[in-house]
Image (cartoon, rainbow, N blue to C red):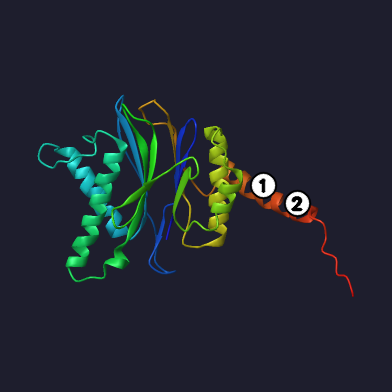
């Protein structure tokens, strides 16, 4: 399992993903789940993956191979004229990979994967998509300005209650760290380190990137501060009164 979030702000896009994969409690590994393709002045495209590791690595490998010799391995992610067409390309790729598994007589449902795709291509606006294992996808809107994949139920309420499109990148980072911290404390299949990336609208270049390790000072402050704030909020609520009839 995993946890990844793509968040759309007035200022641009924010991405965060964990790095834990597991095949049982005694087989836990660390793998990067955030991938980026960038051509300065033209496009920045970021992909977050969740699901079967073999499937997601195959999708990433195919997309990367096509960028090396576009004339022979078209279509390349660098050739797509829009983010919508890029989402179609990624959707077709993940569907084809899973179909090959299914054709080989293996259970395709156990090889499923989901993808968050976001970025901007020159001539268009920043866009954010959620791509399903079947290859179809949906796009973020004002009503649904963020997407989550993986183990999202513990962290979603925090984002829903506190998200504001006018947030700064720094505020969004704090929000996502609280969301991830709540998930980490609730599910062992999600774990540090975390990968963080910003994309500023119309910049057409990679923004701030950081890997947040377990001993990161700011993460420790946020984690401890959120725990204390919850305790204080709970204690400040009025007591329940037992009334005898």
Q: Residue at x 43, y 43 (%)?
A: 140
Residue for badge 1: 225
Q: In this rendering, would 180 be left or right of 38?
A: right
Q: In this view, does 179 lie above or below 163?
A: below
Residue in the foreground of this view, choosing between 201 and 243: 243
Q: In this rendering, would 235 be left or right of 54?
A: right
Residue 229, position in %: x, y? 70, 49
Mark 1 residue element: helix
Residue in the foreground of this view, choosing between 158 and 33: 158
Q: Is residue 245 above or below residue 206?
A: below
Q: Which residue is drawn at 53% across and 40% down?
A: 173
Mark 2 residue element: helix
Residue 129's label in the rendered image is none
Q: In which quarter of the image is the C terminus?
A: bottom right
Q: Which residue is drawn at 48% across and 45% down?
A: 144
Q: In this view, does 24 lie above or below 162?
A: below
Residue 184, position in %: x, y? 53, 57
Question: Alpha carbon of mark 2 to alpha carbon of mark 1: how far?
Answer: 11 Å
Residue in the foreground of this view, choosing between 201 and 88: 88
Which residue lies most toward the bottom here? 245
For disc 2, the neighbor class at 10 Å (few under 14, some 14 to 19, many from 20) is few
Residue for badge 2: 232
Q: Is residue 228 visible?
A: yes
**CB under 8 Å between discs 2 and 1:** no
Q: In which quarter of the image is the N terminus?
A: bottom left
Q: Residue at x 17, y 38 (%)?
A: 68
């Amino acid at each position: 399992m995993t946890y990844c979030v793509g968040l759309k702000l007035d200022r641009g896009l924010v991405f965060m993903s964990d790095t834990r994969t597991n095949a049982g409690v005694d087989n836990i590994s660390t793998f990067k789940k955030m991938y980026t393709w960038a051509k300065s002045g033209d496009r920045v495209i970021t992909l977050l993956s969740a699901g079967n590791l073999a499937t997601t690595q195959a999708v990433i490998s195919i997309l990367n191979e096509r960028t090396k010799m576009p004339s022979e391995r078209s279509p390349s992610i660098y050739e797509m004229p829009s983010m919508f067409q890029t989402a179609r390309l990624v959707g077709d790729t993940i569907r084809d990979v899973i179909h090959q598994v299914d054709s080989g007589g293996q259970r395709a449902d156990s090889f499923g994967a989901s993808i968050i795709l976001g970025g901007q291509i020159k001539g268009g606006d920043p866009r954010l998509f959620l791509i399903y294992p079947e290859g179809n996808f949906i796009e973020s809107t004002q009503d649904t300005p963020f997407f989550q994949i993986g183990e999202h139920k513990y962290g979603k309420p925090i984002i829903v209650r506190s998200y504001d499109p006018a947030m700064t990148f720094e505020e969004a980072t704090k929000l996502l760290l609280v969301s991830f911290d709540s998930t980490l404390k609730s599910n062992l299949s999600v774990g540090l380190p975390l990968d963080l990336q910003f994309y500023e609208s119309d910049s057409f270049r990679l923004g701030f990137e950081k890997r947040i390790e377990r001993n990161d000072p700011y993460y420790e402050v946020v984690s401890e501060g959120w725990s204390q704030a919850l305790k204080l909020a709970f204690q400040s609520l009025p007591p329940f009164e037992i009334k005898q009839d």
